[in-house]
Image (cartoon, grey):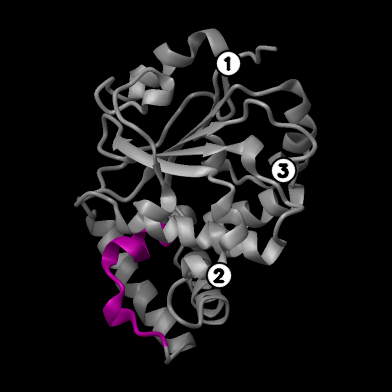
Amino acid sequence: MEFAEESVGGGAEEEEAPQVISEVEKSRIGIMRAVVEREDPSAKLQDVDDFMIRRFLRARNLDVEKASKLFLKYLSWRRSFIPNGAISASEIPNDLAQQKLFMQGLDKMGRPIVVGYGARHNPSKGSLEEFKRFVVYSLDKICSRMPGGQEKFVCIADLEGWGYKSSDVRGYLAALSILQDCYPERLGKLFLIHVPYIFMTAWKMVYPFIDPKTKKKIVFVENKKLRTTLLEDIDESQLPDAYGGRLPLVPIEDC
């Protein structure tokens, strides 16, 4: 069953030059550093580059107070959820065994391409906490493999075969919260492909929690326009072979 192609945010995609920090941004980055260090003296901001601070600022429309609050929340979360500094593969055996997330290639803007298979997610095998660890493990892997000067990635979410067995609204909301609050301005675009109508039952529960900036990056793709839509953003030489391109998919743990 085909799903009409639509961009949730109306098709507009905000893309600022990743390498260029404006004078206004520089000023607010400096102010934000001072605010965060005042509120959390343990924060080691000398290890945090300006681009990371800017992502939090951009996520809050350059509002220093709101961005600082978000960043302080992130620092607290990171310390408690990832006390060892990173999630290891041994902490997420059930999610990795499902072989549901891959990376391969770059889009025309130089952003890494991530491919996820929604039907392979089985919440009955594992736990919500393990899935949250899997999300963090995956995002850290993706971010560590960003090309120089790039801050965002593109994701193809393939929902072919998705059904109630794979439905996991709690997991989706947890992943969304981690992405938006802890890795802001990392998602460049999300293609939802092979979407069955039954998926909309879960989508309607998740949609209200998606912030406006993220909504603008989500595109539902009609089956008959799949290849042409992907080729608008991804060159055939970089397109995964699963969608008619030339590159084999690589499991996230092997990236």
According to the picture, the residue beneath numbered tag 3 turns out to be 206
Q: Nearer the viewer, residue 242 or 212?
A: 242
Residue located at (34% from left, 51% from top): 255
Sequence-first tag of 2 and 3: 2
Q: CA distance from mark 2 to mark 3?
A: 27 Å
Instruction: State the extent of the magenta-drawn residues as a range.
Output: 43-57
Q: Which residue is the site of mark 2?
A: 91
Q: Is residue 17 above or below residue 88?
A: above
Asked whether the viewer can see residue 162, the reply is yes
Amino acid type, callout 1: Glu
Q: Position of residue 93 (x, y in %)?
A: 57, 62
Residue 61 visible in rendering: no
Residue 151: x %, y % from top left: 32, 51
Q: CA distance from mark 1 to mark 2?
A: 38 Å
Q: Residues within 10 Å of mark 2 (few under 14, many from 20)?
A: some
Q: Position of residue 136 (x, y in %)?
A: 51, 62
**Crowd around label 1: few <14 · some 14–19 · many ≥20 (10 Å):** some
144 w.r.t. 165: above or below: below
